[in-house]
Amino acid sequence: MASEDWIDAWFLDIWANANRARLAEYVSDPFVFHLPGGRRHPLSHESYLSYLLLWRQKFKSVVFSISDVISEPPLTVVRYRCQAQYHGGWFNLPGKKQTIQMTGMIQFRRENGLIAECWLEDSSFELYKQLSGTVK
């Protein structure tokens, strides 16, 4: 297994496709997910999969690309881009099947070969501006 297979699995299998088997293979259960603003969520696999399935109803045809990876074990930081088609339901914004762009950085802490904790910083505000029509 290549040293960064788990990174591809996180974005391509887990985030983009809510793949239960890959989540079990690469992520501890439970794990801690930190969001912007300091919010901290201990999540079971079932809770996280429920969220991902809901997210995938709103954003379809998701394509991730990795821009940079910086690793100093046990921490790894990944800068990414995402393109998807928005179908409605996020912050009550109507779906127009428009293509959106997102960027972000996520820091992972791995323990015993599994993701035990992650911190997400993303472009949610820019995404909101795309969907609300304030950015063309």
Image (cartoon, rainbow, N blue to C red):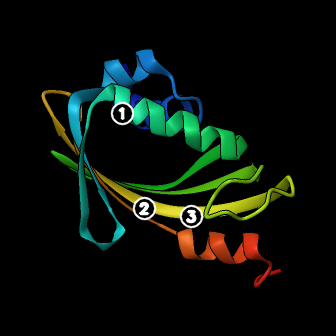
Graded by Cα atoms within 10 Å as few (under 14), some (14 to 19) or many (20 or more), the crowding at tag 2 reads some
The quarter of the rendered structure image containing the C terminus is bottom right
The answer to whether the residue labelled 3 contacts the one labelled 2, judged by CB atoms less than 8 Å apart, is no
Residue 105: image tag: 2
Task: Tell me where residue 129 appears, x and y as whole percent.
Answer: 68, 78
- Sequence-wise first label, 1 or 3: 1
User: Rounded to the nearest whole Å, what is the CA distance between mark 2 and mark 1?
Assistant: 22 Å
**Residue 11 showing in the rendered view:** no
* Residue at mark 1: 47
**Quadrant of residue 44 within the rendered picture:** top left
Q: Is residue 14 left or right of residue 71?
A: right
| Residue type, mark 1 in image | Ser
Residue 75: image tag: none
Which residue is painted at 74% across and 61% down in the image?
100
From this viewpoint, which residue is outermost toward the front? 92
Please name whichever residue, 2 or 78, is drawn nearer the observer in this view of the structure.
78
Task: Tell me where residue 43 appears, x and y as whole percent.
Answer: 27, 38
* Residue at mark 3: 103
The quarter of the rendered structure image containing the N terminus is top left
Which residue is painted at 49% across and 63% down in the image?
104
Q: Is residue 69 left or right of residue 37?
A: right
Which residue is painted at 61% across and 46% down in the image?
64
| Residue type, mark 2 in image | Met
| Residue type, mark 3 in image | Thr
Dot in front, 2 or 1 = 1
Residue 104 position (above or below residue 43):
below
The answer to whether the residue labelled 2 contacts the one labelled 1, judged by CB atoms less than 8 Å apart, is no
